[in-house]
Amino acid sequence: MVMWNSIERVALSVFTSRGMKSVLLAASLIVAAAALSPAVAQQGPAATLKRLTPAAVRGDRQAIRSVAKAFVALGPRQIANASALRPRLRQEALRGSSASATAYALMLQHGIGGPRDAREAPGWLARGARRGNARASRQAAITYALGWGVRRDNKRALQLLAKLDRPARARQMIRISEALLQPGREEPEAALQWVRRAASLETASSVQASELYERLASADPKAAPLVREWLEAAAKKGNPRAALALGERMLLEPGGERRLEAARWLLLAAEQNEPRASRMLVALLVEDATLQPGASAVRDMLEQRASEGSAAARLSLADAQNYQPWETAGHSQQAVDHLSLAAQDGDPQAQYRLAVALLAGETGEPKRELARAYLSLAASKGYPLAMSAITKKDAFSPADARKVIAAAATKTQ
């Protein structure tokens, strides 16, 4: 938190002292702080391990359990005093600590603090799993699925995975599939079974499962329809990555209908804030304008969705308008019109970008008060760039911002 707070203070001072021209500089500082702050937070388990290991070695039961949780969170690794800690963890596991059972199993499996015993480790993982430890369930399931030190037992692996929620279960199934494809192991048929199980759960991992399935079943003519079926199920449940993957695949197929269908899936992904989908939509629009000016089914579809209130459609149309390969009168105004509709409907990204356009005077003289009103609204909704571009002192209240916008609309009528 120290690193985050320091950078945040610098960013805020940049805005306060230099005004709106420093948006990019200060935004980059905010992004850097956000990237660094998780790294600082991740020091927790390591610090716990270092601080409490001496007490755990002396037999403090609370310290043993805390050290076990920290060790499991960090994953298998050589640690100080591992040989003295290992029997303590075993003892606490026998007393009912699932975290200690999982930590002890990992030490056995990886030879930490003593000899490696891959045959005994699964039993301790199963002990932890029986007591509800999710990490133990995951590790034990992988151990039985791959036959690490035990006889392979898919039924037992599935029983252990059943203790996890659907998303976690699907992720572990994909991990098992990937492990079965490692060089030197390579069991594609077994991997394919686990991929199918993962995809059938229809979670966010369906995209990753479909990619694995395509790789495994590249020679199978039935693979493509099945992959599409999985992705469509995931996309309809609200997975933007699945919608993006569908759009990308359809763009590789010939025909205008496929292109239009691809654009529909890309728009669905863009409406769920998938940035790659937004960029691909803009690229489609610009390409269509170059190859067939005035005759784009994709543009017609987006115009229709924009008229129905889709902020993503309006933003894509505005971007495409600004990236046309030739100069045509009215392009900037049309882009601002699309942004204005999305901004008036309350989309914070559109409000921020419209404010930037108004400040730049893209449709005439700069309109600072109106820009300030839209920035204030976007900032009040937590849009990061807007929050960075305007201080609380300079921002309008949402009610005052709406009054400024309404007054500006009356003047233009």
Image (tube, rainbow, N blue to C red):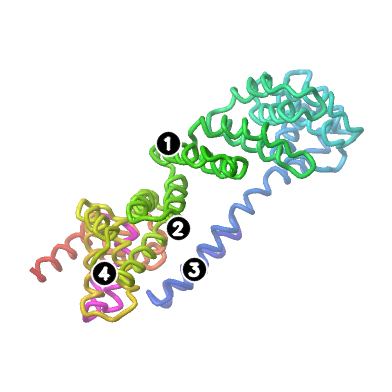
What's the residue type where badge 1 is placed? Ala
Q: Is residue 347 above or below residue 360?
A: above
**N-terminal label among 4 and 1:** 1
**Where is residue 125, by image quadrant?**
top right
Segment tinted magenta in the rendering: 346-372
What's the residue type where badge 4 is placed? Ala
Is 353 part of what is drawn in magenta? yes
Which residue position is annotated with label 4?
Answer: 335
> Is disc 2 placed on a helix, strand or loop?
helix
Q: Is residue 41 left or right of residue 246?
A: right
> Is disc 3 placed on a helix, strand or loop?
helix
What's the residue type where badge 3 is placed? Ala
Mark 3 Cα shell of 10 Å, populated few (<14), some (14-19), many (≥20): many
Is 99 part of what is drawn in magenta? no
The mark found on residue 11 in the picture is: 3
Q: Nearer the viewer, residue 257 or 30?
A: 257
- The image shows residue 327 at horizontal and vertical percentages of 28, 81
- The image shows residue 168 at horizontal and vertical percentages of 57, 33
Cα distance in 3D space between marks 2 and 3: 27 Å
**Where is residue 329, by image quadrant?**
bottom left
Which mark lies nearer to you, 4 or 1?
Answer: 1
Question: The N terminus appears in which quarter of the rendering?
Answer: bottom right
Cα distance in 3D space between marks 4 and 1: 34 Å
- The image shows residue 154 at horizontal and vertical percentages of 68, 23
Which residue position is annotated with label 1?
Answer: 233
Which residue position is annotated with label 2?
Answer: 276
What's the residue type where badge 2 is placed? Arg
Taking the spot 47% from the left edge, 71% from the top edge, the residue there is 13
Cα distance in 3D space between marks 3 and 4: 30 Å
